[in-house]
Amino acid sequence: MQLPAIAFGAMAAVLILSVQMVPWLEFVYILALAKGFAALGVAILLRAGLISIGHALFFGFGAYVTAFLGGGRIVTDLGALLVIATFASAALGVIIGAFVVRYRAIFFAMLNLALSMVFFSLLAKLYAITGGTDGLRVAMPTIFGMVFDRATLQAILLYGSLLLLAGVGYLLKRYLHSPMGQALPAIERNELRLEYLGVSVRRVLLTAYTISAGLAGLGGALMAFAVGHVLPEMSYWTVSGQLVLIAVLGGIGGVLGPFMGAIFFEVVHTLAVGHMAEAWNLIIGLTLIAVIFFLPGGLYSLMQAFARKGHAP
Amino acid sequence: MNAPILTARNVHVAFGGVRAADDVALDIFPGEFLAIIGPNGSGKTTFLNLCTGYVRPTGGSISLSGREITGLTPRAITQLGIARSFQHPQLFTEQSLLENVLLAVAARRHFWSPLRPLDRQAYVEEALSVIELIGLRHQTHSPVVNLPEGMRKLADIALALALKPQLLLLDEPTSGVSSDEKFSLMDTLISALRRQCVTAAFVEHDIELVRKYADRVAVWDQGRVFAVGDPDQVLSDARVMQAVVGVD
């Protein structure tokens, strides 16, 4: 069996078993998996050397699409809302990506940041539509026409997110091993050569940006269901920063890396807030420093190292 | 003689006050190996840049097999059948030689299939055959950043060959390579070109290499084509040796 499948199995087993022992972890894990999807989107762009400090835009957009459609009872089905939020965010990603993928380095990062802050301001100011800084309540979704209580919905969200991770992770792995996925690190190294191979660098990046926007929207929609409320803060730049941090922490070498980073981030956050109120930033900061110095491939590279050790004669 | 693959007529370009291409006219014919020589700054690399879309001419026309390519982007020109290598090899440095060539193979075939792997059997076989052709089979899995300069030059050429171009333009394929290795590199290169039936033009400074390997030679001076013809004939012209090579 391949490493990603083993790693996913191990991660899912740890999550499910720990929830049986410590039930409140269920909510923490749902938040982590939601952020993991968004961080995976950021990680795809990081492969091409592009740092987006504005992906909270798509995270918030996915959440608000869910709140709008669910709140107006236009669409109530959980699965349908997740699909719509994902594709709507991807569509927004096509529009924004067509503009931003022309830029590189700090200009790309800052343009994404600027656009996300414009979106944040619109969410906060357009009170009549978005509920302003109060945000919007997210209606309880149905699943194939059935209504569930909050506790059951949480369980469905956790197991559903793990299933989604398996499915999306498989497709993403295929994509990253395809010529389009392999072109991403090639772009970071030498995009001129890629053009001289007859490949449109802009098209490669626009595809990656669209996928990353869709993933961030999916994460936002999951977060909206888990919390039951959406706020403009979901699009604030600090959330974008968190997504980059999670991606680097977990590692961009594999699909599971951002999810490992997100779980670590959310668990440390929750434990630290409960026991060492202001120390969680310190812990996360020190961990990030340690990862950068000793594990440049992120937490996922630990798994890769174990796998190599296992195969060593 | 067959119709030319590449035709350049009245091509002009200037950088500031410097005329890098001044009424350039040149034909490249199918199957030939054309050497482009001349002193530094005479416009040899600019000509390659004009033919591959990196520089847009301010006047004149360039056509490939009768199709106008003047002013097209490098990507469009590559797709039409001109591939090139660079004076400083342009590679994906952190990736292996195989991964580099695989990208080129995929670029020519089905690049935009998001769920099909790059290292599918048919692509790997084709990439390995190109690597074999340039004699680097033993370096297949080495990151190209670790290869010596001569091998990096060949790897750069391998990327271009994997595109199966009509015309290959090589910018100083032996620069930075030790004089001992130059001839073996050129032997490998010529053998690969002959086996793939690729027409090629190469910019070169080494007159001995030109004498030995070129079918024709075009001499550049101050942005103009100074002389074109058989290497023995052109290189025996005292004006060429004096004005261009600096030898009486």
Image: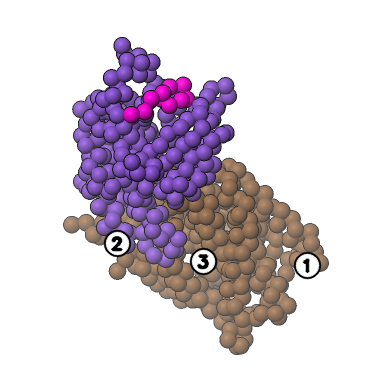
Chain colours: A brown, B purple
Q: Badge 1 local density, few (<14 within 10 Å), some, or many (20+)?
A: few
Q: What's the residue at 60%, 88% (across, down)?
A: A146
Question: Are the residues under badges 3 and 2 in a single subunit?
Answer: no
Circle count: 3
Q: What's the residue at 52%, 38% (across, down)?
A: B61
Q: Which mark is residue B122?
A: 2
**Looking at the image, which is closer to me, A116 or A307?**
A116
Question: Are the residues under badges 1 and 3 in a single subunit?
Answer: yes
Q: Which residue is mark 3?
A: A33
**Looking at the image, which is closer to me, A160 or B34?**
B34
- Front disc: 3 or 2: 2
In this view, which residue lies farthest toward the front? Answer: B1
Magenta region, residue range: B220-229
Q: Position of residue B188 (x, y in %)?
A: 22, 39
Q: Position of residue A82 (x, y in %)?
A: 58, 73
Q: Quadrant of residue B105?
A: bottom left
> Do callouts 3 and 2 mark residues in contact (Cβ within 8 Å)?
no
Question: Are the residues under badges 1 and 2 in a single subunit?
Answer: no
- Front disc: 1 or 2: 2
In this view, which residue lies farthest toward the left? Answer: A313
Q: What's the residue at 63%, 56% (across, down)?
A: A96
What chain letter is assigned to the residue under label 3?
A
Q: Quadrant of residue A307?
A: bottom left
- Identify residue type, mark 3: Leu
Q: What's the residue at 54%, 35% (across, down)?
A: B60
- Front disc: 1 or 3: 1
